[in-house]
Amino acid sequence: MTETSRQSTSARARPVITVFERSPDGGKGLARDMRVRWALEEVGQAYDVRPLSFSAMKENAHRALHPFGQIPTYEDGALALFETGAIVFHIASHHEGLLPEDADARARAINWMFAALSTIEPSIIEREVVLYLERDENWFEQRLTLVDNRIRGKLTDLSRRLGGAEWLDGDFSAGDLMTVDVLRRLGGSGLLEEFPNLSAYVSRAEARPAFRRAYDAQRDFFNSSTAG
Ligand SMILES: N[C@@H](CCC(=O)N[C@@H](CS)C(=O)NCC(=O)O)C(=O)O
């Protein structure tokens, strides 16, 4: 389903997403195009990717698509979007499979998308900032402990809500996709493992064929661009 062609063609019939030209994480599927690729795979929509160097991301041509000079963006015909929440919501709204038919269930799935991005993700990103930028500070350990405890608080609440359920609210939805993609950023921290039901939840989502295809496509893309 995935097409990672780097050639541009006129009159594209399928959406194009921008991605990092080179992998900052060694192809572990953490760059945020992963969640867009995953959503596209879940709904069976083929897509193309346009790789960008870090400097190209900050140029005006790209900023016309993404005001903050980041990836991913999503272009489909005349429509251009940035922000993965909006992109995944758009994909889920225009295809079957990621949002329930029932209006209330749909609203709750969207609710979980927002919770993932605005309640869970910020402290996880803060942890990355601490690790990347504050490691040499003499208060590094205290700050990391503080941020880790803040994350633990969110994970405790999420774990309690998930309980023994397979997914957050009925069938797998865009809410689960976004939540899992955010939780995956904790890989290697040991924090997720403190919550066995959340670990199992992430593993269950990662075992989905659509996730595997998206992950492999991103990794293969990085491998081929590194080789080239
Ligand atoms: N809130 C944005 C965050 C986008 C974002 O942080 N993208 C990262 C890659 S995962 C990026 O482009 N980083 C490079 C930079 O900010 O210069 C979204 O969810 O789309």
Image (cartoon, grey):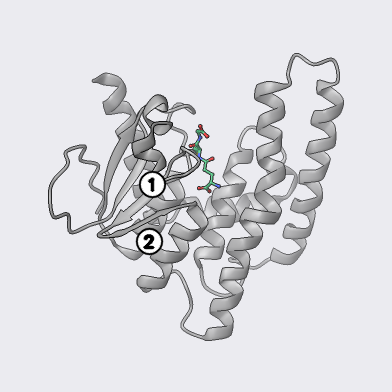
Task: Say which of 147 and 59 sits in front.
Answer: 59
Residue 42 numbered tag: 2
In the image, taking residue 49 as reference, residue 187 lies left or right, namely right
Residue 49 placement, left or right of 209: left
Foreground of the two, 161 or 58: 58
Residue displayed at 23% across by 47% down:
3
Q: For the point 24% across and 54% down, which residue is it?
A: 1
* For marks 1 and 2 on the same chain, the one whose residue lies earlier in the sequence: 2
* Amino acid residing under circle 2: Glu
215 to 40, vertically: above or below: above
Q: Nearer the viewer, mark 1 or mark 2?
A: 1
Q: Residue furthest left?
A: 10
From the top left corner, tell me how far across and down residue 220 is, in percent: 31, 34
Q: Amino acid at mark 1?
A: Leu
State whether label 1 is within 8 Å of ligand 1. no
Q: Quadrant of the C terminus?
A: top left
**Residue at the image position 45 percent from the left and 26 percent from the top:** 26
Is 96 situated above or below 47? Answer: below
Left or right of 183, for residue 18? left
User: Considering depth in this image, is 26 or 73 the residue closer to the camera?
Assistant: 73
Whether residues under marks 1 and 2 lie with C-beta atoms below 8 angstroms apart, the answer is: no
Q: Position of residue 126 (x, y in %)?
A: 70, 37
Q: Position of residue 32 (x, y in %)?
A: 48, 43
Badge 2 marks a residue whose secondary structure is helix
Residue located at (86% from left, 20% from top): 139
Q: Secondary structure at mark 1?
A: loop
Dot 1 corresponds to which residue?
65
Q: In which quadrant of the rendered view does residue 20 lie?
A: top left
